[in-house]
Image: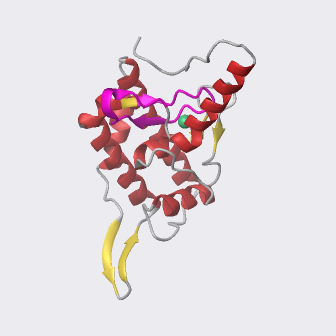
């Protein structure tokens, strides 16, 4: 697998394809049409690579950044750009990936445009439903993955325990051994 799906949510893992996004040098794992095709297949949006081109990649990045803008707006309580809502709704209005029954079972086919519509529709469900109040950014500063915190008491600190929680616990442990104060999570918060 080329890609990672730490928070298990289609739209939010898509947002996470720009890693360490608030650092001066974010890492974009959607760095080619092939990488986008691989994301669609690995995420389960489509069974086979849609054959994305450079224009599809540009559309994917524009959708991703619009979703992030809307998620950040929810987390920080600041209004997102109106263009972000328009773009999300425009992509979601197109036909999504189509499941059909084949001789060997369910087949999910999509063009890049259809695959992006599936992602956009998922983002509409997250941003337009009760999960929107539970959006958080991972507390590991080097991560910045956003996720839905549906834990009791809204106490989850990390996008994924295996990916980030354990790393931060190890860091905190080493800091304690050195006699340093505990690390404070640095994350997007309401302000
Ligand atoms: Zn994380």
Q: Position of residue 142 (x, y in %)?
A: 63, 30
Q: Tell how many labels.
A: 0
Image quadrant of ligand 1?
top right
Q: On the rendered image, what quadrant is the C terminus found in?
A: top left
Report the front residue among 24 and 162.
162
Q: Is residue 144 magenta?
A: yes
Report the front residue among 111 and 168.
168
Q: Is residue 26 magenta?
A: no
Asked whether residue 81 appears in the rendered view, the answer is: no
Color encoding of the figure: secondary structure
Eyeballing the image, is 144 above or below 29? above
Q: What residue is at 48 percent from the left and 46 percent from the top? A: 14
In this view, the residue farthest toward the right is 178
Report the front residue among 29 and 113.
29
Eyeballing the image, is 176 above or below 137? above
Asked whether residue 62 appears in the rendered view, the answer is: yes
Q: On the rendered image, what quadrant is the N terminus found in?
A: bottom right
Q: What residue is at 59 percent from the left and 53 percent from the top? A: 3
Q: Position of residue 135 (x, y in %)?
A: 37, 31
Left or right: residue 170 versus residue 17 is: right
Q: What residue is at 55 percent from the left and 20 percent from the top? A: 185
Q: Which range is magenta?
A: 136-157
Eyeballing the image, is 68 above or below 177? below
In this view, the residue farthest toward the left is 129
Q: Position of residue 58 (x, y in %)?
A: 54, 46
């Amino acid at each position: 697998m080329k890609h990672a799906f730490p928070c298990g949510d289609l739209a939010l893992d898509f947002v996470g394809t720009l890693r360490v996004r608030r650092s001066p040098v974010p890492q974009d794992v959607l760095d080619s049409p092939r990488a986008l095709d691989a994301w669609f297949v690995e995420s389960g949006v489509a069974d086979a690579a849609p054959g994305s081109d450079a224009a599809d990649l540009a559309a994917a990045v524009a959708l991703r950044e619009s979703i992030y803008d809307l998620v950040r707006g929810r987390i920080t309580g600041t209004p997102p750009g109106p263009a972000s809502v328009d773009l999300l709704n425009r992509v979601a209005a197109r036909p999504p990936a189509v499941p059909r029954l084949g001789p060997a079972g369910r087949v999910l086919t999509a063009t890049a445009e259809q695959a992006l519509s599936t992602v956009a529709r998922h983002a509409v469900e997250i941003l337009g439903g009760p999960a929107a109040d539970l959006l958080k950014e991972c507390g590991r500063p080097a991560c910045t993955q956003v996720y839905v915190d549906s834990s009791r008491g809204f106490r989850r600190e990390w996008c994924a325990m295996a990916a980030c929680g354990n790393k931060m616990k190890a860091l905190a442990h080493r800091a304690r051994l050195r006699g340093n104060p505990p690390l404070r999570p640095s994350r997007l918060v309401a302000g």
